[in-house]
């Protein structure tokens, strides 16, 4: 399957004070880069047309991190619909055969994951697909405007959903999509999204499970939540937050949920035996440090301590004679679990990413997840362990260090 993508980043950023929000740094990377990297990494994506405002086309073309699958930077219009039309037209006029699937995505939604893209592409077939989330609030019809608005009936929640992007359709519908959007724009009728246009031309839109991490960055108030959801590179944290809140039900409110973040990096040594997540790698030298250097367990411990507001691992176990040299990091984590449990914290989900050039970790990740789960007291299904080479850049990519970042969701008793 071949997929071509229109990535829309042409907004004026009015609600962000006129700033180009696509270049705002979120969790250590420009907002735009999150979507570009996810699309670049997916094997089915063939090319991306990036659509931006006319005054930004040249600047975007000079960005060093624009990936190779971006084959064109097109000039957008004065509305999102006009920008989508420009991108679809650029795809149609571009080189090569028409793709099997066309996808349209908003750069303001950075939380793309491989799993979500897989679901969308599989559901599209000869029709169309879009991600959607269930609604938890009561939905009502409204009459009037401004302060004169009144309730005019209700809409059953089970008959409604919040639709996100990317929105996909079979390549055979491209010409009709371009024609219909053009007709709507000429009549000053702005479609709300691609699914509304697809529905107008008689294409069935299949809805797949969305992802709360696809939250749209609208104004500065969205940044703190987006930072927390993206900081570990987790693909399903948003969804887990919703699941946990639902599972806790009457026992907890959002105020009792805690997010813990942990990050640790150690240089690679020249002797000893590497330990990551409590798993031994005898073919690789240990990481240097006062303890056994297990950055995974250290980062988890820091995330737990942070969620419980109990400081950090270095404060609890300083690199002095008070902490035995070479101490097993599993013992340190057990102590942290005891302290945070006593403070009323109950972890529910751990997601982590290990960044290392070597050794190859893929085959050992399930074992690592089980070991971590046993140490923290969680089912293995509530621990997600991922590995990356960091695109072979920096100390981790060069093999000089190993890093682990962790995002943890927990409940604070008595909050």
Image: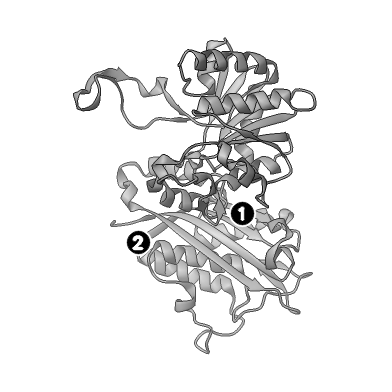
Residue at x-position 74% and y-position 62% = 357
- Label 2: few (<14), some or many (≥20) within 10 Å? few
Q: What is the x, y in percent for residue 351?
A: 55, 53
Looking at this view, name the residue that lies furthest to the left: 148
Which quadrant of the rendered structure holds the N terminus? top right
Contact between marks 1 and 2 (CB within 8 A): the answer is: no
Q: What element carries label 1?
A: strand
Q: Does 277 sit above or below residue 167?
A: below
Residue 152 placement, left or right of 307: left
Residue 392 placement, left or right of 225: right
Quadrant position of residue 13: top left
Q: What is the x, y in percent for residue 285?
A: 74, 74
Q: Does 400 sit above or below residue 249?
A: below
283 or 188, nearer to the observer: 188
Residue 231 placement, left or right of 398: left
What is the number of the mark on residue 409? none
Mark 1 or mark 2: which is in front?
A: 1
Q: Is mark 2 on a helix, strand or loop?
A: loop
Q: Does 283 sit above or below residue 270?
A: above
Which quadrant of the rendered structure holds the C terminus? bottom left
Q: What is the x, y in percent for residue 364?
A: 71, 57
Q: Does 198 sit above or below residue 13?
A: above
15 or 264, nearer to the observer: 15
What is the number of the mark on residue 385? 1
First of labels 1, 2 by sequence position: 2
Residue at x-position 67% and y-position 51% = 65
Q: Can residue 100 be seen in this view?
A: no
What is the number of the mark on residue 344? 2
- Label 1: few (<14), some or many (≥20) within 10 Å? many
């Amino acid at each position: 399957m071949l997929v071509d993508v229109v990535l829309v980043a042409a907004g004026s950023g009015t609600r962000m004070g006129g700033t180009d929000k696509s270049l705002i740094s979120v969790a250590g990377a420009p907002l735009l880069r999150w979507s570009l990297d996810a699309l670049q990494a997916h094997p089915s994506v063939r090319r991306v047309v990036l659509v931006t405002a006319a005054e930004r086309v040249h600047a975007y073309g000079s960005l060093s991190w624009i990936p190779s699958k971006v084959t064109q930077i097109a000039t957008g219009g004065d509305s999102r619909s006009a920008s989508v039309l420009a991108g679809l037209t650029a795809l149609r006029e571009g080189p090569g055969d028409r793709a099997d699937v066309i996808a349209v995505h908003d750069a303001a939604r950075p939380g793309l994951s491989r799993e979500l893209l897989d679901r969308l592409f599989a559901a599209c077939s000869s029709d169309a697909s879009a991600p959607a989330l269930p609604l938890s609030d009561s939905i009502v019809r409204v009459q009037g405007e401004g302060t004169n608005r009144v309730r005019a009936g209700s809409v059953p929640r089970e008959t409604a959903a919040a639709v996100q992007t990317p929105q996909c359709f079979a390549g055979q519908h491209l010409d009709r999509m371009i024609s219909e959007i053009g007709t709507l724009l000429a009549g000053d009728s702005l479609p709300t999204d691609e699914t509304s246009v697809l529905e107008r031309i008689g294409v069935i839109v299949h809805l797949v499970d969305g992802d709360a991490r696809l939250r749209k960055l609208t104004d500065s108030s969205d940044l703190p939540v987006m930072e927390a959801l993206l900081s570990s590179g987790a693909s399903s944290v948003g969804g887990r937050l919703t699941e946990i809140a639902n599972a806790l039900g009457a026992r907890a409110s959002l105020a009792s949920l805690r997010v813990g973040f942990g990050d640790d990096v150690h240089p690679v040594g020249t002797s000893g035996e590497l330990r990551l997540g409590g798993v031994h790698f005898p073919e690789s030298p240990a990481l240097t440090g006062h303890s056994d250097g297990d950055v995974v367990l250290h980062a988890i411990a820091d995330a737990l301590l942070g969620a419980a507001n109990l400081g950090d691992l270095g404060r609890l176990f300083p690199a002095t004679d008070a902490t035995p040299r070479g101490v097993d990091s599993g013992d340190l984590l057990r102590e942290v679990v005891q302290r945070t449990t006593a403070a009323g914290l109950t972890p529910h989900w751990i997601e982590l990413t290990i960044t290392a050039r070597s050794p190859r970790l893929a085959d050992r990740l399930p074992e690592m997840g089980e070991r971590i789960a046993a140490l923290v007291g969680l089912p293995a299904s509530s621990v997600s362990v991922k590995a990356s080479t960091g695109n072979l850049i920096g100390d981790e990519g060069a093999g000089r260090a190993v890093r682990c970042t962790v995002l943890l969701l927990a409940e604070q008793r008595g909050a």
